[in-house]
Image (cartoon, rainbow, N blue to C red):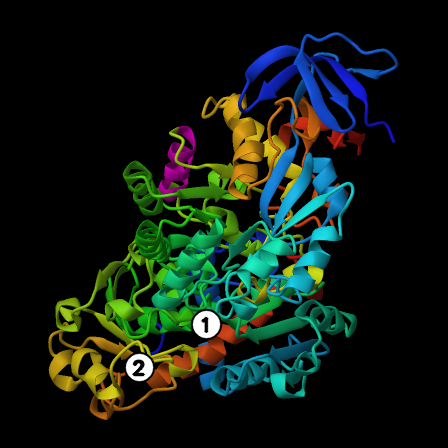
Amino acid sequence: MPASDHSPATLLPGSAVFPHRHLTGIAGLMPHEITFLLDEAEQWVEANRAKKRDKRLRGLTQINAFFENSTRTLLSFEIAGKRLRADVVNMHAAQSSVKKGETLIDTAMTLNAMRADVIVIRHGSSGAVRLIADKVDCPVLNAGDGAHEHPTQALLDALTIRRRRGSIHNQRVVICGDLLHSRVARSNILALTALAAEVRVCAPSTLMPAGIERMGVTPFTDFDAALEGADVVMMLRLQNERMAGGFVPSNREFHLRYGLTLKRLAKARPGALVMHPGPMNRGVEIDSAVADHVDQSAITEQVEMGVAVRMACLDVLTRRARGVKGWA
Amino acid sequence: MIRDVALLNADLVCPTGGSSTGGVLVLDGVIAATGVFELPDGVATIDCKGKTLAPAIVDLGVFTIDIPAFHAGGVVRVGLMPDQTPVLDEPGVVQRAALIGRPGLWIHPIAAATRALAGKDLAEMAMNAAAGAKAVGTGERWIADSGVMRKVLAYAGDLGLTVIAQAEDAGILGNAVATAGETATRMGLPSAPALAEPLAIARDLMLAEETGAKLHFRQVTTAAGFDLIRAAKRRGVHVTCGITPAHLLLSDIAMTDFRTFSHVSPPLRDESDRQACLAALADGTIDVLCSGHDPRGPEEKRLPFADSANGMAGAGTLLALSLGMVRDGLITVERLVTMLSATPARIMGLETGTLAVGMPADLMLFDAGAPWLIDGDKMVALAGNTPFDGLPVQGKVLRLWKGGTALI
């Protein structure tokens, strides 16, 4: 895995470079603000590899409020917070008062009263994170809300692409799979198009969101055609738990038309990067031979970048509260 | 209680008699004369100071009984949707609903066309009509079984009752809360194509044509839907349709930032369909303007968009928002009053809605030019959930009479 060869952009002094209180989505971020977060994450990639310790969030309380089940994202945020020495508390939906009928607003006010310094939220409904963010005094990080956004996933994907391909600009990225139910796809489309990638999306019509071409992408229903000249192939899993009724006839038929096999990958550019936000359905949207491809698969690297990106976001969003010079 | 009164010096707007200046003489709660008339001895007079006097609004298809909101908006009669708790599907419940608002608000229940609105078995339409129901309806639901819908139309047709239908194919609709398109895609909301509406309309129009029944679509909001209705009217099908100001004035962009006050049913459409709504208003395809009054408190609205209840508080803003369309030249004020009063009354078989002699003196006096700001926090409705919060408008109800009795 190569070290970063990216030269950070010239930083503006202080909070002017990232004037946002929360990170509820990629929507609303300017390209230079996305780049700033990626540049910030670079230092944490290297620090983590070198096992350097940092205590900048010491004494701060980070609450991970996950109203929807998650393993990897929760773990990633928890590790990110702990590596910065924050006091990390996890709140799972099964343990929360939401199960007892408490409203989301009440939960938000409760979290607020506990004087958290940063709250990380995952919720099954689009817009839920925004609703909470409006009610609390501390920064809120969106760890995925419904089919809306998953901004840190898009940032870690962008960081992975930038490190492996040298740049995001002009890269042809194909995002294939269950686009209709994917918050990852939405955030990635916003981030990658903002950074001037050429984005193609591919799915059967039953899983293609209406009007997606107005987000600056080119829709395809033929995966083989979409793969022509691709630099990056990003696969999404079928989110059966979000589907009411079948959107595709079967997993094996989906694999036939949209599964990424070695043979199909050959239609992309030589050495094209293979990505997947996980968890993978091996043999459905991606073959093991592709997922485990030593040279082309960046799937485990995405996980690594996830920790770095989340450390960067936690650091940046708490700077004002920590009184960092230029951010107060 | 004064039921004999002469309202003088007004601009009169009557759906049947047109516009004129003069007054309205009310004797024993009934319109006794209009225009220039001889003032009987001992009758109280009110100087209308040149403001507009018109039939009070008959609001067809409201969901909640909210008397202060209706009176503030110039409404004295409402067609109450069957989606109540309990559902308006049996005579006792219908009769009770019909009596709740009197004397200041006359509620005309729209009885459920099928038991419990389940879309399976016919409800007791004749008995419900005898108990006070003025129409039958499918509520906010769609009858998926075409055989049942055919029976509903045929049976209601025998009774002379209009069927008030929801124009949304439930199979296409699924759990959608938005119209499929760029906005819903960006927000990641469950959405359905606008096609759900014309699909439902096409079926019900064919059934209405075959059975000869009277059919009213409470809300039509798509270009394709209006095309079907225009064609059906030309063929002589007994069909009418309505709309709320929200669908005329807002597109799905109003949902941006997850504004749950813009969560309405049917969901807001894209700009091209909104323009089609305005065209249908201008060419007379739309018959009724209604508020769809459905106040929802923060318990139901301060939620993530898809989890929030649909509906908006519309009674208090119906007249002012509609008058904007008169100022824009889309319709005349006579046409507006027809859509607000006479046509909804006709659809429900009510003897009201005009200034004709012999009609009950259900009257509103309004100032078409009075400016005010829509403020959800200050609305007199049970809740102030309006997507028009903060919008400056013109047109205010000054006085309101039901059967000659002053309400405001």
| Residue A276 colored in magenta in the image | no
Q: State the residue at coordinates (55%, 64%).
A: B124
Q: In the rendered view, does B288 fall on the left or right side of B353? A: left
Q: In which quarter of the image is the C terminus of chain B?
A: top right
Q: Say which of marks 2 and 1 sits in front.
A: 1
Q: Main secondary structure of the magenta part?
A: helix
Q: Which amino acid does label 2 sit on?
A: Ala
Q: In the rendered view, does A156 fall on the left or right side of B83? A: left
Q: Where is residue A138? Give x, y as percent.
A: 69, 65
Q: In the rendered view, does A314 fall on the left or right side of B267? A: right
Check disc 2 and report the residue beneath it: A298
Check disc 1 and report the residue beneath it: B120
Q: What stretch is highlighted in magenta?
A: B272-282
B40 versus A128 height, above or below: above
Q: State the residue at coordinates (81%, 11%).
A: B40
Q: Where is residue A237? Give x, y as percent.
A: 33, 81
Q: State the residue at coordinates (54%, 75%).
A: A311
Q: What element carries label 2?
A: loop
Residue sitting nearer the eye, A206 or B149: B149
Q: Which amino acid does label 1 sit on?
A: Lys
- Same-subunit check for callouts 2 and 1: no
Q: In which quarter of the image is the N terminus of chain B?
A: top right
Mark 2 vs 1: CB contact within 8 A = no
Residue sitting nearer the eye, A298 or B263: B263
Q: What element carries label 1?
A: loop
Q: Give the letter of the chain under mark 1.
A: B
B136 versus A108 height, above or below: above
Q: Sort mark 1 into few (<14), some (14-19) or many (20+) by Cα contacts within 10 Å.
A: some
Q: Where is residue B169? Give x, y as percent.
A: 38, 61
Q: Where is residue B224? Give x, y as percent.
A: 31, 46
Question: Can residue A133 be seen from the camera position used here?
Answer: no
Q: Sort mark 2 into few (<14), some (14-19) or many (20+) by Cα contacts within 10 Å.
A: many
